[in-house]
Image: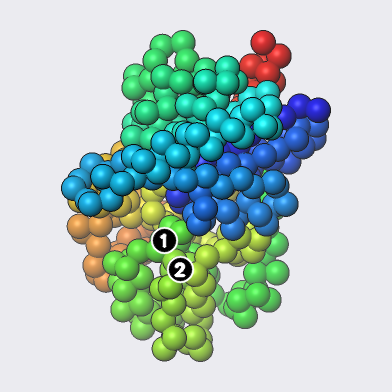
Amino acid sequence: MKKIILTGGGTAGHVTPNIALMPRLKELGYEIYYIGSYHGIEKELIEKENIPYYAISSGKLRRYFDPKNFSDPFKMVKGYAQARQLMFRLKPDIVFSKGGFVSVPVVLAAKHAKVPVIIHESDITPGLANKLSIPSATKICCNFPETLEHLPEGKAVVSGSPIRRELLHGDRQKAYTYTGFTSDLPVILIIGGSQGSQLINETVRRLLPDLLPRWQIIHLCGKGNLDPTLHHRTGYVQYEYMNEELADLFAVSDLVISRAGANAICELQALGKPNILIPLSRAASRGDQILNAKSFEKQGFSYVLEEEELSEETLADAISSVWENRQTYISAMQESRKSDAIEIIVDLIEQLRKQ
């Protein structure tokens, strides 16, 4: 039996590409294991897939002062010891890492056990976790050609991001039933990321009186961010997070407002959905979402509204502009030729396993 360990966590974006690979890996006869953190979002998502899940200690290396910076390195050392034990116990043929700090000890342990490692970097520039892992990687997959200049020559492959196949086959009618919406008005889907965005949530909710006469709104607002006063607002539904039903919600949506995480925007491109991207600001991140968004804007796929510019007025203007020019965005996405990321990555997995 062929064996593979998948790892990655911290956000849904570090997990869903792994989930996208699973059906193809199963078709090829792989026994799949997953290593993640004790309480991260990856645990919930992977256990729903009925994949054996192994939790290890996980820390985080921050670029700013925090008292946890003194304790987290010890957690990572413990995680490394746990990951080494799992390597010798599970005896994988290969490891595939989607990033996040929980993946670092797994990648280092795989190198120690002489197990080939493939890393996937979603953003234009590598994040800190992947920077730490790159020296131990056999190959590094990425989404953007611009990323190659940041990676070791000979290791990097432009693969694109694995997209869950079910996202491409959503059922519009099921979404109408689930949300209680009708076909009378177009639908906006708002995705603030798995953790949600207070700024986006508040701006959208203040804008509801202007939007609801012309739109129906599906709002994925993040864990703990539901507004009880809006539970029965006609034309507006809110959910913390979606998994199985997300494909149907995409199918019914005519316009999407989203953060600019690389996996999220690659899904929008594959679906051909007119979209407004609101990337995390540099004050709240290392600026990777801004680079991702600007790349998509340059290619004609997206309208970009930076967080510092976000207001009820600018969001309303962006919605009007994208809706008026929606066919231009759709055509640009349809004309772009993206490779099948799942097949590229799985072929690479097969090649390295046989070496």
Picture quarter containing residue 5?
Answer: top right
Determine the residue positioned at 34% across, 19% down. Answer: 149
**At label 2, which amino acid type do we have?**
Lys
**Residue 318 vertical placement versus 52 (above, below):** below
Residue 195 circle label: 1
**At label 1, which amino acid type do we have?**
Gln
**Depth check: 93 or 17 in front?**
93
Picture quarter containing residue 70?
Answer: top left
- In the image, residue 10 lies at what x, y percent? 45, 49
Callout 2–callout 1 Cβ contact below 8 Å = yes
Q: Which is more N-terminal, label 1 or label 2?
A: 1
- In the image, residue 35 lies at what x, y percent? 58, 41
Q: The C terminus is located in which quarter? A: top right
- Residue 14 visible in the displayed image: no
- In the image, residue 231 lies at what x, y percent? 49, 86
Determine the residue positioned at 61% across, 45% down. Answer: 54
Q: Is residue 265 left or right of residue 171?
A: left
Residue 223 circle label: 2
Q: Secondary structure at mark 1?
A: loop
- In the image, residue 279 lies at what x, y percent? 32, 51
